[in-house]
Image (spheres, helix red, strand yellow):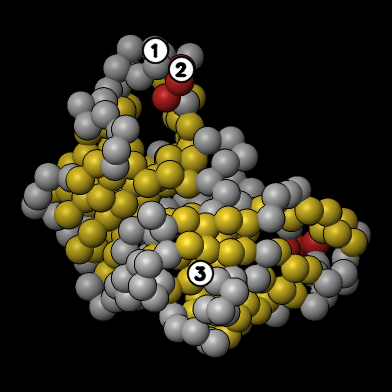
Amino acid sequence: GAVVSQHPSRVICKSGTSVKIECRSLDFQATTMFWYRQFPKQSLMLMATSNEGSKATYEQGVEKDKFLINHASLTLSTLTVTSAHPEDSSFYICSASRADNSPLHFGNGTRLTVT
Amino acid sequence: GNSVTQMEGPVTLSEEAFLTINCTYTATGYPSLFWYVQYPGEGLQLLLKATKADDKGSNKGFEATYRKETTSFHLEKGSVQVSDSAVYFCALSDRASYDKVIFGPGTSLSVIP
């Protein structure tokens, strides 16, 4: 079946550094990818919608200069957390949408810890 | 706007007990409804879905029926197993394309032997 791969699964970084998270669709072309953030014991909050070859659409309250999204190909989207701070520590999950209108496929998430 | 409400957890059940997790939604139009499951340390997996009123989604012994009159999509399973321990999210999308899914807060289920 369709698989979405997310890398890395865990990352620890120091405050002030930047971290890049990759989301790849392994056996299909993803017309749209979504980035979610999940705080402990809370639901997933949509951060942004990323379409290949165009600028991402950010949800209200999400800083686009802080969370840089690049969707350079139909199989890869990246989320870069710039100048990370401890409050950015969270679980980030991507999902991908196929052109055949099937339900979203989710990656396994990235646990980011900023010290 | 669209939203999803779920019963609060955590829910703890003994093995082979009956499970119900309530879910209600608010949406304009005719949303598609989903249940996703998240096992510890993993991403989300689609458990089941229903795209129109009175549809019943089912998978791995879990069932949920799309009730438009009560705007509900309650998840049920007749006999839970330890391996069902996970967080369950009710969700909707406001278009048939399944894009931009809105999630409920999640319900943590622990099944004890």
Left or right of B105 in this view: B51: left
Q: Residue B12: percent from the left, percent from the top?
A: 83, 54
Write down the chain letter for disc 1. A
Residue count near mark 3 (Cα–Cα under 10 Å), binned few <14, some 14–19, many ≥20: many
- Per the image, label 3 sits on a secondary structure element best described as strand
Tag 1 and tag 2, C-beta contact below 8 Å: yes
Q: CA distance from mark 1 to mark 2?
A: 7 Å
Secondary element at image label 1: loop
Picture quadrant of residue B22: bottom right
Query: Most extreme residue toward the front, as rendered?
Result: B69
Q: Residue A97: x percent and y percent?
A: 29, 64
**Position of A59 relative to A74 (above/below):** above
Closest to the observer: A96 or B32? B32
The dot on residue B104 is: none
What amino acid is found at the position of numbered circle 1 in the picture? Ser
Residue type beneath disc 3:
Phe
The C terminus of chain B sits in image quarter: bottom right
* Tags 3 and 1 both on a single chain: no
The residue drawn where x is 71% and y is 74% is B76
Residue underneath mark 2: A86
Give the class, few, some or many, for how many residues have Cα within 10 Å of label 2's Cα (few <14, many ≥20).
some
Of tags 2 and 3, the one toward the viewer is 3
Q: Which residue is mark 3?
A: B34
